[in-house]
Image (spheres, rainbow, N blue to C red):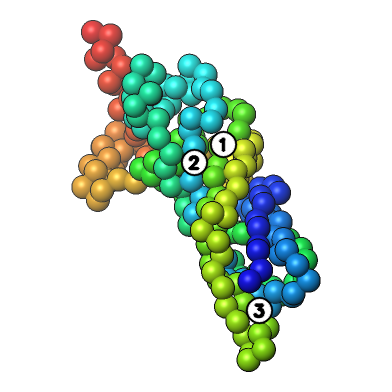
Amino acid sequence: MTDVTFAVLGIESEPYAVTPRLNARLGVVAVGEEPVHAIALRAQVRIEPTRRAYSDDEAAGLLDLFGPRERWSNTLHNFQWLQASVMVQGFTGATQVTLPLECTYDFEVAAAKYLHALRDGGVPLQFLFSGTVFHHGTRGFSVQQVSWDCEDRYDMPVSVWRELIEQHYPSTGWLRLNHDTIEALGAYRSARGLLSFDEAVASLLAASSTEEIR
């Protein structure tokens, strides 16, 4: 049996991906001189919100997720962000590998809401590793599972997330709406001669603000 450990060395945005993707650079260490043929590595990435403080602006952005601050002692819990996998090529001793993290901008996803609410500092991440380690054995290949307690924590700079989103959605964002809502919004836009859905939403918000003042 070979003890294998994993450490997150850094996270950066992938500049050439079609969809938003981060790259987590992992350090992999195999204790002993026996070469590792390959590792089919999986990782569950979780967010640990209790590991950082939040400004008032950030707390306002987290209201939908955790409620007001006075409830955070009961509502602030770790939650899953994403699942990722990669094949680690053969090595002896130590190596590094890039773990791709496919991201979403969908505001309906809890992790996306959390990330968008943060202004600065770090995103407190926990990586839980699992998978299969392949060795050259006396009768061909031998197989062992990655130890259940392999994990690491990493505070990803919020700026990395913001850079990723700005790269794919420069100065814009999107919301998922059902077909009936889109049709109604399109009819509203056409009836008022507005050029875009953005203008239609702005018009509705302005009308709503006027009604509130009255």
In this picture, is 13 found above or below 141?
above
Task: Tell which circle, 2 or 1, labels the residue nearer the N-terminal end.
Answer: 2
Res 123 label? 1
Label 2–label 1 contact, CB within 8 A: yes
Label 3–label 1 contact, CB within 8 A: no
Q: Disc 3 marks which residue? A: 135
Mark 1 Cα shell of 10 Å, populated few (<14), some (14-19), many (≥20): many
Residue at (69%, 47%) from the top-left corner?
A: 10
In this picture, is 177 found above or below 4?
above
Identified by mark 2, the residue type is Ile
Disc 2 or disc 3, which is closer to the eye?
3
Q: Disc 2 marks which residue? A: 47
Displayed quadrant of residue 145? bottom right
Q: From the viewer's perspective, is 176 left or right of 173?
A: left
Identified by mark 3, the residue type is His
Identified by mark 1, the residue type is Val
